[in-house]
């Protein structure tokens, strides 16, 4: 894997240190200590990293989510990763690392040159590949994971998908043009300004480019939620159902958490319950959220019908 880091040296060093080797099953074992996220999600510590990640990666890919309790974007990305891990049903495992509770792994992450969280690494056959840096809505995370595993299959690192299995999104698509690639690379490294500039360049060339529209909408959403605490925002929205701006912020939090239908329903309800400027603000924000999904997405189609009903 281009850019991969070999974890073998770290594993060998850990085995020489008393107490560093995890107890329990090795590479072929089932997930040893499932987290609250489900059967295919495991909490990993300084002591269990080698067994639950390095050794396990010899038989199944492992995505490692580095997070912390104080990190708002981590709370947005984490549930999305857990949902997708459970959907994958064992095709890959999600390992969650609380960097505050596990300082050795936190320091190791910094040694890799990573300075911010959330950060997700992919570990396959003992090789660590930096994968995601920063939060993103569910469709973008899902697509990134599909593209990662398709690339690994093309390199022969993973076996081909079983016959009849749905190919990864974009697997047969032509190579992205340089501007699109620049935009996606900027998103991956958390460079929102660079990503927006590239997406706007695409829109200048083709104002109806759906990928560029989604990209700009994603950047704007990411900026809006950067300073929000998800739990506090949703609690405030529950306490102030008539405050449209509070409902708008809550809808943004739900979008980055993969709860698109809840976000749409929330704003449709706000349109139905308000009038004047408040109603217009809720309506316009809902329309802006539609740009995060393909125009033919059934969730968008359903929400558009609900909005029309609320307006008329």
Image (spheres, rainbow, N blue to C red):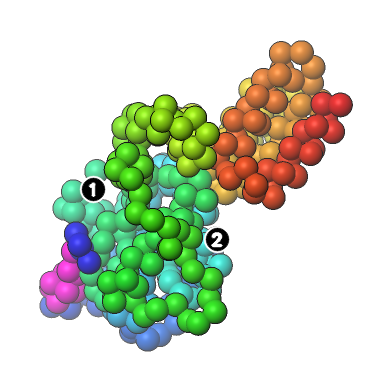
Which percent across, then down, holds residue 123? 30, 68
Which percent across, then down, holds residue 261? 68, 46
Above or below residue 231? Residue 130 is below
Quadrant where the N terminus sits is bottom left
In the image, 84 versus 145, the foreground residue is 145
Task: Please state if 208 lies on the left or on the right of 52 as rendered.
Answer: right
What kind of secondary structure does the magenta stretch mostly adopt? helix
Quadrant hosting residue 20: bottom left
In magenta, the rendered stretch is 5-13
In the image, 220 versus 201, the foreground residue is 201
Residue linked to disc 2: 83
Asked if the stretch drawn in magenta spans residue 303, the answer is: no
Residue linked to disc 1: 114
Quadrant where the C terminus sits is top right
- At a point 31% along the width and 32% down the height, the residue shown is 194
Above or below residue 289? Residue 107 is below
Asked if the stretch drawn in magenta spans residue 6, the answer is: yes
- Disc 1 versus disc 2: distance between alpha carbons? 25 Å
Quadrant hosting residue 101: bottom left
Task: Please state if 257 lies on the left or on the right of 284 as rendered.
Answer: left
Q: Is residue 262 visible?
A: no
At mark 2, the secondary structure is helix
Task: Please state if 248 lies on the left or on the right of 150 as rendered.
Answer: right
Which percent across, then down, holds residue 193? 34, 29
Which percent across, then down, holds residue 105? 25, 59
Task: Please state if 179 lies on the left or on the right of 295 as rendered.
Answer: left
């Amino acid at each position: 894997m281009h850019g991969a880091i070999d974890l073998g040296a770290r594993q060998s060093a850990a085995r020489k240190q008393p107490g560093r080797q995890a107890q329990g099953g090795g590479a072929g074992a089932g997930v040893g200590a499932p987290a609250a996220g489900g059967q295919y999600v495991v909490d990993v510590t300084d002591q269990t990293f080698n067994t639950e990640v390095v050794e396990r990666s010899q038989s199944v890919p492992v995505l490692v989510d580095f997070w912390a309790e104080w990190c708002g974007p981590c709370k947005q990305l984490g549930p999305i990763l857990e949902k997708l891990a459970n959907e994958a049903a064992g095709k890959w495992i999600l390992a969650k690392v609380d960097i505050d509770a596990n300082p050795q792994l936190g320091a190791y992450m910094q040694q890799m040159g990573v300075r911010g969280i959330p950060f997700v690494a992919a570990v396959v056959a003992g090789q660590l590949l930096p994968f995601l840096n920063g939060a993103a809505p569910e469709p973008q995370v899902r697509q990134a994971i599909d593209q990662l595993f398709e690339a690994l299959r093309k390199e022969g690192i993973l076996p081909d998908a079983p016959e009849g299995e749905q190919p990864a999104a974009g697997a047969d698509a032509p190579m992205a043009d340089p501007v699109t690639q620049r935009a996606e690379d900027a998103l991956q490294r958390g460079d929102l300004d660079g990503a927006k500039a590239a997406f706007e360049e695409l829109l200048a060339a083709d104002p109806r480019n759906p990928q560029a529209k989604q990209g700009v909408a994603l950047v704007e959403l990411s900026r809006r939620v950067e300073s929000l605490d998800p739990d506090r925002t949703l609690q405030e929205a529950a306490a102030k159902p008539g405050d449209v701006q509070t409902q708008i912020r809550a809808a943004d939090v739900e979008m980055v958490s993969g709860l698109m239908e809840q976000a749409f329903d929330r704003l449709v309800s706000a349109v139905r319950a308000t009038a004047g400027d408040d109603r217009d603000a809720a309506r316009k924000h809902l329309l802006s959220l539609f740009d995060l999904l393909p125009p033919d997405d059934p969730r968008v189609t359903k929400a558009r019908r609900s909005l029309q009903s609320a307006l008329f």
